[in-house]
Amino acid sequence: MLWIVSGAMVTLFVALGWSALPSAIALQAGAIRLQDELAGSAPIAAPVFVLNEDGSALRFGVAAMASPGIIRVGLYDTFEPRFRDAKIALSLPGDGRLLWLLASPNERRELREQADALALGVSFAVTEILRSDAFGADYRDPLWALLRADAQSAWDSLRDSPAWRDLAHRYQTVLRQTAARDLQPIMERRLQGIVPRMLRANAMRLVDPFHDRTWDLEPIEDDLKEVLREVRDRGLIEQTGLQLLQTPQTLAFLKQFIDVVGTTLARDSALIELVGRMTEDLRFRPYTEAATTPLLNLGRTGARLLVSPRADSKLNLVAATAIHTAIAARFERVVVFVNPRQRDQLRALDPSSVHVLRSLDPAGF
Amino acid sequence: MTDDPHALTVTDLTIVRPDGGLLMGDVSFGVGPAELVLLVGASGSGKSTLLLLLGGLLDTEPGEWTVSGRLACGGRDIDLSDEPSDVGGVVFQNYALFDDLDARENLRIAMDHAPPGGPGLTEELAAILADIDPRQPVSACSGGQRQRLAIVRTVLANQPVLLFDEPNSGLDIVSSRRLIELIRRLCRIVGKPTLIAVHHFSELLPLADRVLVIDPHARRLIEVPPDAAAVEAGLGAAPPKDDAPIPANDPEHWTHSVDGGTAAPWFARYLAGYFWLLCATPMMILYVAAGACIIGFVTVWFGFNYYSFGGLLRSMLHDETLVGLGAVQSRVAIPLIANLLFVARNCAVIAADVGNRAASSQFQAMANLNIPGRRYVFSAILISMTAGSLLYLVLSLLLGGWAAQETWHVHFPDQYRGLFRVQYFRLVLDSHGWPLPAMGWVVVKTTLSAFLAGGAAILVALGAKPDNLTVSRTVANAIVAGVIVTMIVHAAASVIATR
């Protein structure tokens, strides 16, 4: 009899313990296979979330790289009722953008208000500082000198770069096209009768031997004024400028330029020392206070809404994921299961960050 | 003396005590087949020592007893200074029955280890046991029943000589007469020389063939006529009370129950017995399971309740905390606690059991019955300890993990248990669910410490030679020794494993 009791106890305890053992859910046959063009070739083990109706996100599984471009997703509980509706898999960035994307509309609105207040305060503070006598007397000249020097240094370092060569080549092409397509017809039309008019205006000068031969250029000037007026009226300069700015080469060059300028500024010890003196200058304190309060409010609101756990939970694993990524570049992207309405909202919020993952299983999941 | 190969002949026997004092010098005597001889002497005169010598149980290692002389019996001639005698089957004064075996098994184990050609459980022998249920535990037998069981067990052991050590000690005269009649009867049935060491002899004299008295002054044996105690003759006329019919168990129960077999299953019998005692009782399972659950609960509950920075830090460190808790619990805490509980309880059990066997002469009886008792018992204990510790390691790891999971889920009810499982076992199991190589050290330290602790408990129990007064101290010492051994092994293995 006691043997039976012992056997029953062991069976019960082993069964309990067995139920707590993990299974390699991402490697199991039931795992979901998804195509993710953004997934690199490096092996990943990214967290998977499911989005609740109230916008809160819950850790729901594990994603693992199966092969380049294909990930396998193992879910903790495929019978979870929430998963019945949230059947669309999205790939989202695992960094701070994840916090913004997975915040609720109310949270985003509250943060926007705080951010607007901060922008206003910063704008006011900067304007007042730049206008102040103290800035004009002690900081303006050395600051501009340092900024100019750093900008020049960045420019010098980029003048022979491939990005600049691509940009110059592209600009020449655009300008040639503009000249041939738009400017040449205007010039041809406007300057069509310039020769007879010049002859008429300068006929006496051609045959008068007692005067210097100073030409009357007024017809040309008039025609050129007409050409410029037409160019201006037709918006050719703005169009051409816009066309130049919209070229990928401009964007690439500007990115590189800003990057180099930023790096140069960050390494400029004289600039750092000057800015340090400005922040410690008590004469600016009345102006900076306009930005300090909104900054603190934004920080508090951001921590409360995005990082702290919600009222009904003790964990905020979305924030943990984003912070881990910010600190250690841990999760490049995460997988989030959403319903169609949530998908549309997220895409509207940040189309470039939200990618819909396609199921590779014919029956879907 | 006689030249009959079934007789016992001892010549020129000298026994010197461990302290160097002479116990007997140049003693010679003989006992013929089916002859019953009383060996009479004062207390401390050497009666029991002579019986132990004939039974091969006297310790003649250097520094102990010194013996010389020759012994001839059963066609063998033994130089006692070189070779122990193993011709005598001893019925001990306290019977030395095996408490963990029932009545039938006490006889079967003797029979299964006896030299071939023994009498087996004849109807005459079975009749002696008629009032005993073969499956009766020896602890439930009366004094008389235990005595008869011990006598029959010794007969079944099929030694050439039967030796009885103070069989009438504590018995009244009538019971003593009944006993000597029983022995007399057995002696004739089996036809073997029988030597009875007694202190109170008067009531035994009428049935004795010869009487040998130990002269305490000359330290020799002197043969006297068996009627020297005529004063006791009137007492022997009283009708024995036990002429009343013995209650009624069919002797065939015994003859069928104690069929001869082989020695091999007896180790399995002891192994099963000790495995049950040390590893498989419900209380033992409950005890270790409770320990594992408590460790799983306490570690997780307080681990997550005492984060100083509240929610943010808890969220950030959640996964890593689970990984760390899983590693610490699975590699260190649960194995250590489960092992300590296992070892502490079992060291107490081992000390009590082995100490009881030593104190009640069970090991001597086993040796006298040709049973490799120490090998059986110690091997069974050590195998049970080692295997049991491994089984309890697995059980406690499983249960501790489950308790940790449920505690975690109480703490974070909105999260899926799958999240816990993946993180908690990350440094314990590989992606296919097999233990990581680091868990090998856990197995090593658990089994090694249980093995060594079991050995330590055996040594403590044997070394202390416990009696009723010192048994508590022996048990406590065994627990302390086992726990210290366990902690040292775990600490050393953990340090080595993390290097």
Image (tube, coloured by chain):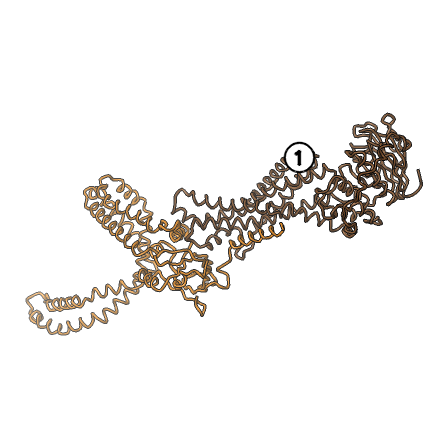
Residue B210 seen from this side: yes
Residue A41 seen from this side: no
Left or right, A269 with reference to B103: left
Residue at x 30%, y 57% (from the top left corner): A105
Chain that is coloured brown in the picture: B
Q: Which residue is mark 1?
A: B471
Left or right, B92 with reference to A93: right
Does residue B204 sit above or below B262 in this rendering? above
Residue B481: % across, % down = 63, 37
Residue B498: % across, % down = 55, 45
Left or right, B364 with reference to B223: left
Instruction: In this rendered view, identify the residue nearer to me: A207 or B317.
Output: B317
Residue A88: % across, % down = 39, 64
Does residue A280 sit above or below A67 in this rendering? above
Left or right, A129 with reference to B293: left
Using the image, name the chain to which the residue with label 1 belongs. B
Instruction: In this rendered view, identify the residue nearer to me: A344 or A51.
Output: A51
Instruction: In this rendered view, identify the residue nearer to me: B490 or B292.
Output: B292
Chain A appears what colour? orange
Instruction: In this rendered view, identify the residue nearer to me: A196 or A314.
Output: A314
Q: Kindly identify the amino acid type of the residue bearing the numbered disc 1.
A: Val
Number of marks = 1
Mark 1 surroundings: few (<14), some (14-19) or many (≥20) residues within 10 A = some
- Quarter in which the C terminus of chain A is drawn: bottom left
Residue B300: % across, % down = 47, 46
Residue at x 35%, y 64% (from the top left corner): A340
Secondary element type, mark 1: helix
